[in-house]
Amino acid sequence: MRRFPCTFLILCLCAVHISVYAQTDRTEKKLVKWVDDNNDKALMLLKDIININSGTMNFEGVKAVADVLIPKFEALGMETQWLDGSSFNRAGHLVAKIEGGKGPKIMLIGHLDTVFEKDSPNQKWRQIDEHTIKGPGIADMKGGDIIILQALSALHAQGLLKDMNIWVVMTGDEEASGRPLSASKKALIDAAKWADIALGFENGDGNPATVNVARRSSSGWKLTVTGNAAHSSQIFKPEVGAGAIYEASRILYQFYDQLSKEEFLTFNPGAIVGGTTVTYNDTEKSGTAFGKNNVVSKDVTVTGDIRCLSPGQLSKAQSTMRKIVANHLPNTNATIEFGNGYPPFAPKEGNYSLMRTFSKVSEDLGFGKVGPVNPADAGAADISFTAQYVQMGIDGLGMSGADDHTINETGDVRALPKQSKRAAVLMYRLMKGIKIEKK
């Protein structure tokens, strides 16, 4: 076999590199190189914070992750703050800011907590193969937190960050929100009111060829039904009526019959207790029921969630549910309450425009086009609280992975430099005032 000279091979590799990044300017190439040169350090930092248990209710652990990251942001010239979460029964939030005056105001969203509490068997970084790591929160979303830091560090290394307007919010209760939400989500809402653009670094659907331009809402409802307790032989008689369980069954079936076919709308009754004597604990999400086959049921409690794509869709669904509840069977009564939760992150045109700009960045870096995640597959996230304030936003810029929220959660470490490069170049182009891609 004929051997090519080494110098020829080097020239070929250089030609491929130039071709891949042909659409990037000199500064963008420096951003890319910085990320590559510092990727090993980023992986070590990711390992360090993964090995700190930060389940939402482990307040000390959540704060410990923040304590590792705060000096990293301060080294970039950012003003940092730990916002104590005692007012909403959570650890708190990390905030980092820099306001230099150029370009749009951009907020970057991460979270410090995971679903893995101290009693979980999933506690440590474990290498599966060359590219795959198992670890608590590697995809959801400590990998995304490090991508935020890497992107900002690359911009700082080129002297760009000091002239940008960036507000980072890393919450400590994304996986289990504190209450009241007005206190729990205040940091996010304050940043959103300041910002023009929101970038979320959740892992999305785990596919780096997609981002979230929309996320459905997540909120709760509680149905309370009463009937007349009586001997079962008297059920359906005018003075007794149908009983609470029949009334609850009617309501739930009509929810299904009238609303289940509406696109992007789901509503799930997650728990039901009914009988002669019923208790239900809203905090613990559990209850008890006592009843006899020969006694007409007196009480029923049903709790569930509702998810939708826009405020209008939510309002319409709630109105329909209220009308169904109000149409009682004989001698029964029912009420429904709707709780606060995550609002929808509706798919407005600004989000699609930002996605197309991000896709152009990805193509110019040689990583291919980026398209939208189907909203039906996108759950609620912290970016949802920015929806009514920012001009545009996208989520899913974080670490690729699989099986998040399970003890088998994995992350693809190749995504760390890739996503960091795309985020850094996107923010650089936004700072330069590059025209947002429009249809």
Image (cartoon, helix red, strand yellow):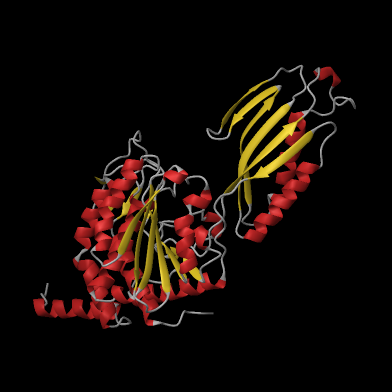
At which x and y percent is residue 112?
36, 50
Q: Nearer the viewer, residue 339 or 175?
A: 339
Instruction: Write down the quadrant of residue 60 in the picture.
Output: top left
Question: Horizontal placement of 38 versus 362: left or right?
Answer: left
Q: Position of residue 157 (x, y in %)?
A: 22, 72
Q: Is residue 32 left or right of residue 335?
A: left
Q: Is residue 393 above or below residue 57?
A: below
Quarter of the image that includes the C terminus = bottom right
Q: Is residue 395 above or below residue 137?
A: below
Nearest to the observer: residue 74 or residue 257: 74
Which of 356 and 280 lies nearest the eye of the viewer?
Answer: 280
Q: Quadrant of residue 227?
A: top right
Residue 267: x %, y % from top left: 63, 46
Q: Is residue 229 visible?
A: yes
The answer to whether residue 399 is visible is: no
Direction from residue 158 to residue 277 in the image, left or right = right
Q: Quadrant of the N terminus?
A: bottom left
Query: In this image, 277 relative to 232: left or right?
Result: left
Find residue 169 and report its horizontal and vertical position in percent. Answer: 39, 59
Q: Residue at x 68, y 49 (%)?
A: 260
Residue at image position (34%, 49%) is 410
* Rendered position, 187 above or below 244: below
Which of these two is toward me, 261 or 203? 203
Q: How many marks?
A: 0
